[in-house]
Amino acid sequence: MDNKENKQIENILKKSAENIELKPFSERWQVIKDRLEFDSGEKVVVKERVPALALQNNTNESKKSNVNTKKIIILSICLFLIIFLAIVIPISLRNNEPTYFGPTDLIHETVDETTFFEHINKSKIDIVDITIYECDDYTLFKTDTGEIQGGAFLINDEENAALINVNFYSSAVIIPQDDFIKSDKYNINSTEIFYYRLEDNIDLFEYEVLANHKNVTYELKYLSVTDNILEFFNKFFV
C-alpha cells in the first residue's frame, strides 16, 4: 500500500471509533468486577490476642501450683523427721540406759586367786578387803559377753569356827529381797544389813544375809558353832 491508501484506512478507523458509544464506567464495572481477582501481594498477619484475664488465671494457677508443691515438700520433710526421731530417739535412749541382770543371767567361772583379783580389779567392783581372811573357791560371775558383774569366794574363819559363803554383785545385778521382808536389820555407818537365822540346824548357827556396801550387793550364808554374826559384820563391812 501507498501512503494514500494508508491515510484513507486511518480516516475510516477514526470515524468508526468516534461513532462507538461507550457505556458509563459504573455500568461496565458491574459487569466485569465479579470476573476479576485481586491479589495485591501483601499479607496481613493477624496476631492472636490472649485475653488479659486468661493470662492472670494462668499466672495465679502457676503460683498456686508452686505453693502446693512447696507445701507437699515441707510436709514430706516433716513426716520424715517425725519417723526418724520416733525410731532413733528410743534406740539412743535405750543404748544410754544401763543394762540390768538377774543372778541367773550370769555365767559362773571357777578361777585361781590371782586371776580372780586381776579380773575384779579391772572390773572396778570395789569389794571389801578379804586379804585378812583365809579364802578359797574363787569364782567370777560374767555376762554372755564376758563382762565381770560379780564373783564368789569361801571364807574359812578358824578363829570363830565359821564358814561363810560370799556372793557379791555389781550395781547392774538386781537381787530379789522377798526372803528378807521380815528379817532383822543391822546398821554399820551407811550400810544396812538384813539377816535372819535358819532354824533347821539347831546345833549350829546358820544365817542368810543381804547387804549393800559401797554400791556392791552381798549375799552371805553364814555357818558357825557360836552366835557371833554381829562381830563378823563389824569386821567384814568396814
Image (tube, rainbow, N blue to C red):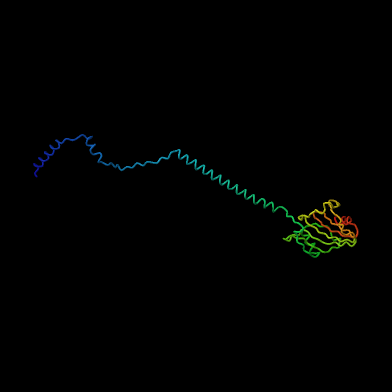
Point out residue 90 in the picture as x, y percentages from the top left corner. 67, 51
Q: Locate the C terminus by quadrant.
A: bottom right
Q: Is residue 204 above or below residue 82?
A: below
Q: Is residue 152 above or below residue 191?
A: below
Residue 138, image x and y in percent?
81, 63
Query: Taking 12 as reference, is 126 left or right?
Result: right
Q: Residue furthest bottom?
A: 112
Task: Kindly indicate the quadrant of the structure image that contains residue 140.
Answer: bottom right
Numbered-mark total: 0
Residue 190, compared with residue 131, is above or below; it is: above
**Towards the viewer: 192 or 37:** 192
As drawn, the residue found furthest toward the front would be 200
**Picture quadrant of residue 44:** top left
Image-based side of 56 in relation to 148, left or right: left
Query: Measured along the vertical axis of the image, is residue 147 above or below residue 35?
Result: below
Observer-nearest of 101 and 129: 101
Q: Quadrant of the N terminus?
A: top left
- Return the x and y of residue 212 as percentages of the image width and height: 81, 54
Q: Position of residue 150 (x, y in %)?
A: 78, 59
Foreground residue among 110 and 117: 110
Horizontal arrangement in the rendering, residue 35 relative to residue 51 (left or right): left
Whether residue 222 sits left or right of residue 77 in the image: it is: right
